[in-house]
Amino acid sequence: MLSGLAAGRLTAVEASDWAGQWVGSDCEVEDDLVFDAIQNLWGADMPVAPGKYLYGPLDFRAWLADFEARLKP
């Protein structure tokens, strides 16, 4: 989902809707790195004004780069 969002294959709304099933539910995500990415995705469509969003393509690519960097030992 994160790579799809960063590549523009998904909208922020689609990514946020998907992530919402994991945040605040009974599902537990045990991997902190994955949970951090899910939380970012959940906030991807956070509005700051009508038609304006807090995050955009540069942020999405930065989230993916951070996720990938943290995967490496």
Image: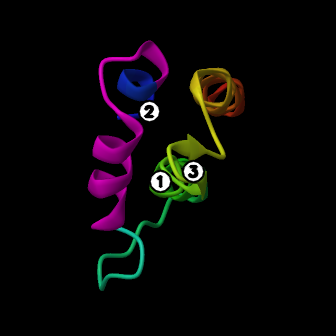
- The residue indicated by pointer 1 is 38
Mark 3: few, some, or many residues within 10 Å (few <14, many ≥20)? some
Mark 2: few, some, or many residues within 10 Å (few <14, many ≥20)? many
Mark 2: amino acid: Leu
Q: Contact, CB < 8 Å: mark 1 with mark 3?
A: yes
SS at circle 2: helix
Please name whichever residue, 4 or 56, is drawn nearer the observer in this view of the structure: 56
- The residue indicated by pointer 2 is 2
Mark 1: amino acid: Ile
Mark nearer the N terminus (2 vs 1):
2
- The residue indicated by pointer 3 is 40
> Mark on residue 64?
none
Where residue 33 sits: x, y (%)? Answer: 59, 49
Cα distance in 3D space between marks 1 and 3: 5 Å
Identified at 38% across, 52% down, the residue is: 16
Q: Which residues are magenta?
A: 6-21
Identified at 63% across, 39% down, the residue is: 55
Q: Contact, CB < 8 Å: mark 2 with mark 3?
A: yes
Where residue 44 sits: x, y (%)? Answer: 51, 47
